[in-house]
Amino acid sequence: MKTEVDVALLIAGLSLLVSILSFVGGSRRNNKKDTQKDTETMTTVVVELKNIATGVSKIEGEMGDMKRNYQEVRDKVVSHDTFLATMTQRIDQLEKKGG
């Protein structure tokens, strides 16, 4: 009877050892998978941030172009306004001479 108990304890001990080893092995695999997933996620985030930075740079460039265009239009309006004032003065002078 003692041998049967010893064999049962030996089998129980071996089962416990196998289950512990399986748990440790599974944990290591899960950690590897988690690390791989984290790396993939971070890579995706970095790529997206680079895309956003590129988009911001393009927008900044376009805004610079718009500011230059606005300044050109503004300069033309000032030039036309000056020309119109000069023409108005000339018309007034001609009306005074003719009238």
Image (cartoon, grey):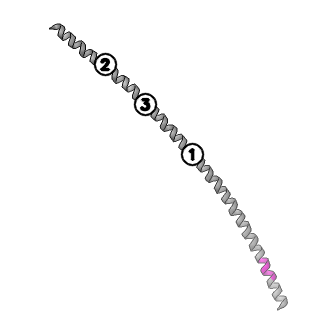
Q: Mark 2 points at which residue?
A: 18
Q: Which residue lies furthest to the left in this view?
A: 1
Q: Is the magenta stretch mostly helix, strand or loop?
A: helix
Q: What residue type is labelled 3?
A: Lys
Q: Which of marks 2 and 3 is nearer the N terminus?
A: 2
Determine the CA span between mark 1 and mark 2: 49 Å
Q: Name the residue under label 3.
A: 33
Residue for point 28% across, 19% down: 16
Residue 60 as seen in the image, left or right of residue 38: right
> Crowding near pointer 2: few (<14 within 10 Å), some, many (20+)?
few
In the rendered image, residue 88 lying in the magenta stretch gets the answer yes
The image quadrant where one finds the N terminus is top left
Q: Name the residue under label 1.
A: 51
Q: Residue furthest right?
A: 97
Magenta stretch bounds: 85-90
Residue 64: image quadrant is bottom right
Q: What secondary structure is found at the residue carrying circle 1?
A: helix
**Residue 81 spot, x, y in % from top left:** 74, 73
Check contact, mark 1 vs mark 2: CB within 8 A.
Answer: no
Residue for point 70% across, 63% down: 71
**Residue 30 spot, x, y in % from top left:** 39, 29
Q: Earlier in the sequence, mark 1 or mark 3?
A: 3
Residue 92: image quadrant is bottom right
Residue 72, placed above or below residue 21: below
Residue 32 as seen in the image, left or right of residue 72: left
